[in-house]
Image (cartoon, helix red, strand yellow):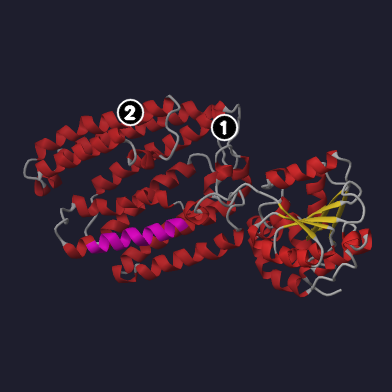
Amino acid sequence: MNEACAPASSAAQAQAGTSALRPLCVDLDGTLLRTDTLQETLVGALRRAPWILLALPFWLLAGRAALKRQLAARARLDAALLPYDPAVLELVRTERAKGRRIVLATAADATLAEAIARHLGVFDEVIASDGVRNLKGEHKASALRERFGERGYDYVGDSHADHAPWCSASVAYVCASEGVGTARRAREQGVHVVALERRPLMRWPLLRAMRTHQWVKNLLVFVPLVTAHRLHDEAAVRSSFLAFAAFSLAASGAYLLNDLADLEPDRQHPDKRRRALAAGDLPLWVAVLLAPLLVVLAFALSAQLGARFQLELACYVAATVGYSLWVKRLVLVDVLTLAGLYAVRILAGAAAIPVPVSHWLLVFSLFMFLSLALAKRHAELSALARRAATVAPGRGYRTGDRMLLGLMGVVCGQLSVLVFALYITSPEVRALYSRPALLWIACPILLYWVARVWLLAYRDELNEDPLVFALRDRASLALGVAILAVLVAAT
């Protein structure tokens, strides 16, 4: 039988037997799972051993089934962490309770399919690719006909790849809008089609995966524009906006890469498991293709800002890649790296104008951003402690480290204010400000803000990145406006 549906001999034959006697065959990729196991194993295998990228073409020459077997053996996916579809699971458990035989029928490799079947404990049989035969499309339909006969099973699928199994089934369950048109053709051949309602995908999954709300961090590239008193220079303002756009694109590419590298830890985290990639709301291949594309666009956009800016941007990209793949698992090194990434944005903003960077500004920034990075870790560990967790997934921290991180963060925040106070007494201030004594007003404002951030952190009320929090918090915005007014009055 080819991919076209074979007409049923009669309506009675199509509906022969009761549904309680027919096995229910369930597809895996995109149906039971809200993700694709081939993409999952590819990402997982490359995460563990990037050098296997060279072996992929040779494995593919042996066929897709052989490729799936090789990747499944190296990825070592944890079946308990994969994103399952609640609606499909409910259907399977309901039908099993009625006494039906439940079969997992998938083109995924048998070793992975069997691990999933063992984990869920609701399948009586697994029919899957065996390393030689890729059980997809007509191959899957043929295997099901050989096992259960024409119209001898019901089939749950989600896309055009399930056309052939649907056509041989007695009842076709469709659980995605993509498969409705294909299933309609099966209905024309006498197959009873049932639409299965699923939990809708999150809104704007790509934008959420790119974390566009985190672009506010890149406003730091405007700091040199303000401190160098270049706000009236149209060319400098235009260059700063271009630098902001370039860093935002590069940051989104880095976030996509980070989420690909962090799939398993994110799925173990009570909040991060809702991220678009971890939840299966965005296909992994989109992130794999888009992450490098965004970085390339960032460098293309920054070409007119000069080699110095592009060097800073390259350092930022290299540091974020290193952070995503390795550094974030190193205790304390990770927060030092985060503080450095904030400082790189300021250096890049200075390179875009271009203006020299004050050493005072850099030292102040490192202490302040180290305090904020520690506050972020403290908030994450506090959230885990509330859920009785003891270890942060994918990190080197334990929830018992919160006290030490908090002490270090408070000290770093106060040191940043001390550096600012010393800067006020330096000769550089008299060259930039006509009334430098007014800058002392900013010191208690900074002290208050740092103390407030850490007070909220200790109260477990700081639930996001502190810098993002500051740009959403009314009190923080008011304090920021007050400091800006002080700077203007002192000029």
Q: Which residue appears at 77% of the width and 67% of the height?
A: 188
Q: Residue at x 78, y 72 (%)?
A: 63
Nearer-N-terminus badge (2/1): 1
Q: Nearer the viewer, residue 369 or 286?
A: 286
From the viewer's perspective, tell me whether residue 86 is left or right of residue 362. right
Q: Please, what is the dominant secondary structure of the magenta stretch?
A: helix
Residue drawn at x 47%, y 36% is 377
Query: Does residue 248 belong to the magenta stretch?
Result: yes
Tell me, yes or no, whether the two marked residues, 2 and 1, touch with CB atoms within 8 Å: no
User: Which x, y percent locates residue 200?
Assistant: 59, 49
- Secondary element at tag 2: helix
Which three-letter amino acid code belongs to the residue tagged 2?
A: Arg
* Residue 373 figure quarter: top left
In the image, the segment drawn in magenta is: 238-252
Closest to the observer, 242 or 327: 242
x, y percent for residue 364: 28, 42
Three-letter amino acid code at the position of disc 1: Arg
Q: Quadrant of residue 489?
A: top left
For label 1, the residue is: 398
How many residues crowd mark 1 within 10 Å: few (<14), some (14–19), many (20+)?
Answer: some
